[in-house]
Amino acid sequence: MRLNYILKTSMTALWANKTRSTLTILGIVIGVAAIILVTGLGQGAQNLILDQIHGLGGQTIIIEPGRQPQGPSDFSEAFTDSLREKEYQAITKKSNIPGIKQATPLVVLSATAIYNNETKRSQIVGASETLFNIFDIELADGNVITNEDIKQMAFTTVIGDKVREKLFGQSDALGQKIKIKNRTFKVVGIVNPMGNVASLDIDNLIVVPYTTAQHYLSGTNYYNMIMVQAESEDIVPQVNEDIKRTLREMHNITDSAKDDFHLVTQADAIQMVSMITNILNVLLGSIAAISLVVGGVGIMNIMLVSVTERTREIGLRKALGASNANILTQFLLEAILLTSIGGLFGVAFGAGGSFLTSIILSKTVAAGWSFTFPVQSAILGLTVSALIGLIFGLYPARQAAQKSPIEALRYE
C-alpha cells in the first residue's frame, strides 16, 4: 500500500472525528504554546536588560565592596565598608591608574521625598557630576550637581521626570524645595525622560551630592560603589588590573582570593545576565514541557479507543490484503499527524500570546520591551510534538497491527 494512500486514509479518519481530534490535541497545543510564550518573554526580558547594560558603556567599570558573590550565601559579603574616601582618591590618581578618564563614588539609599502634601518614594543616589556624564543624562532644565556642591555638602538635588510629575504636577519644579529625611533640598535640575540605564531608573531618581548623602541621609562614611570610566574600551582590562593592584596595596592583600572588593564591567554583566536568563528559560520551558507528556498520554488513550472502535475496519482491510505494516503505519501516522497539527497551533497561539503580552509589558513595565519570536523553541516544540506522536502512538498502532483478521471481523 502506497504511503500517499495511507496518509489520505489517516486524514479521512481524523476528519471524521473532528471534535475528538480537537480535544485530543489540546494538551499538545497548550504545551507548545506555553514553551513559546515562556521563551519568547524570557528573550524579551533578556534583550531589555542587555540593552540597559549596553547603555552603561563599554568603558565603565563598577567597583563594589566585598568579594565577588559566588552564591546566595556570599551576598552578605557585599555589605562591607571597604570603599571609602581614601580609596576613591587613590583610584582617581593618574599615577596609580593612568587609563582612568573620570570616576564618581555612589551612595545609594531609598527614601521618601515630600513637597507640600505630595510624597514620592524614590531611590536616592549621592554622586557627582560624573554620574551624568557616564550615563549620558541630559537635563530638561537647570544644572547638575557641581564640585562646589560636593565641597560644601550642599542641599541641592536633581530629580527625574517621574519624580517631578508626582511632586509638582504641571507646576514649575525648578528652584522649589523638597524634604528628604527631614532635610530641605533645593531642586536645581530636572532630568529629561530616559527610562532605565543599567540598574538605575533615571526617571524615578533623586540625585544629591555624595557628601551630603553620606553625612545627612545615610550616616555612613563609606561608599556603596565607585564608578570608573576608562579612556577607551580597549584599555578596560588594563584599568581593571591597575584598580585591583592599587586597592590590594592599600588593603595589604597578597592573595586575590581574599579581596574585599570586586569589579564589574559591561562584559561581566552581560555574561551574568545571559547565564541567569538562559537557566531560567530552560527551567520554565522544562516545566511547560510537562504538559506535552500529559498530552502524549491523552493521545495514547484516544488512539487505543480508536483502535477498539475500528476493529471491524482493521479486520476488513486485512482480509482485503493489508499487511501488519500497513495497519501499523496508518495508526502511527494518525498519531503523528495529531501531535504535529497540535504543535503548529501551539506555535501560532504561543507567538500570538507572546506578542500581545510584549505589547502590554512595553506599555506598563518598560518601554523598551520588545517582542522576540523564539525560532529555536518553535522548531524544538514542533519536533518534540511529532516525537510524542511517534512514541505514544506506537503502542496503539502495534495493538491494531497485531489483531487477527478473523477475530476482528467477528468483533461486535
Image (cartoon, grey):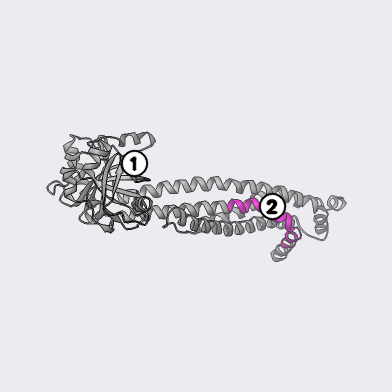
Tag 1: Cα neighbours inside 10 Å, few (<14), some, or many (≥20)?
some
Toward which corner of the image does residue 257 lie, by quadrant? top left
Task: Give the residue type at disc 2.
Answer: Thr
Give the residue pinned by disc 2. Answer: 24
Nearer to us of marks 2 and 1 is: 1
Q: Position of residue 135 (x, y in %)?
A: 28, 54
What residue is drawn where x is 53% and y is 46%?
286
Whether residue 325 can be seen here: no
Q: Is residue 92 left or right of residue 57?
A: left
Residue 132 or residue 323, whichever sits in front: 132
Residue 320 or residue 14, whichever sits in front: 14
Q: Position of residue 67 (x, y in %)?
A: 29, 37
What residue is drawn where x is 34% and y is 41%?
110
Q: Is residue 338 left or right of residue 37?
A: right
Tag 2: Cα neighbours inside 10 Å, few (<14), some, or many (≥20)?
many
Give the residue pinned by disc 1. Answer: 111
Residue 265 or residue 362, whichever sits in front: 362
Residue 26 part of the magenta-drawn span: yes
- Write down the region rendered in magenta: 11-32
Whether residue 285 can be seen here: yes
Q: Earlier in the sequence, mark 2 or mark 1?
A: 2
